[in-house]
Image (spheres, rainbow, N blue to C red):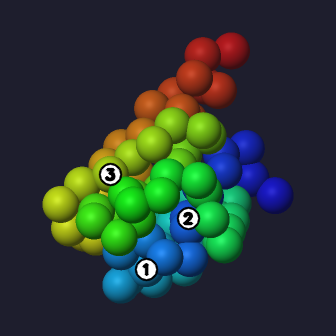
Amino acid sequence: MGIIVVEICDGSLINQIDVESILENEYPEVAVMMNECLSSCGLCAVRPYAMVNGKKIFAETPEACLEKIKHRIDLELALYKLD
């Protein structure tokens, strides 16, 4: 289990790409959790989105959303490296 949790709604448009494999291979600190619903009704049908440690990340395309997710992961990892 990772120190950073990325939650993805089953209905999210980001599922057009294999986010789970991409992120878990690139970031061993990340756990991707697929959920039936993240209670952001409507957003998943309009824009690709995911939650990174409870913060909503969304963009116009799945690829742009993935880049924003990676950026948020990098920011979260930087917090753990401050020690």
Quadrant in the rendering for residue 53: top right
Relative image position of residue 22 (x, y in whole percent): 47, 74
Precedes in sequence: disc 1 or disc 3: 1
Residue 35 visible within the image: yes
Q: Are marks 1 and 2 in contact (CB under 8 Å)?
A: yes
Residue identifier under label 1: 15
SS at mark 1? helix
Q: Quarter of the image containing the N terminus?
A: bottom right
Residue identifier under label 2: 8
Quadrant in the rendering for residue 47: bottom left
Q: Nearer the viewer, residue 58 or 83?
A: 58
Which label sits on residue 54? none
Q: CA distance from mark 1 to mark 2?
A: 8 Å
Amino acid carrying label 3: it is: Phe
Q: Are marks 1 and 3 in contact (CB under 8 Å)?
A: no
Relative image position of residue 39 (x, y in whole percent): 59, 53
Which label sits on residue 58? 3
Residue visible at 28% across and 65% down?
46
How busy is the neighbourhood of tag 3: few (under 14 within 10 Å), some, or many (20 plus)?
many
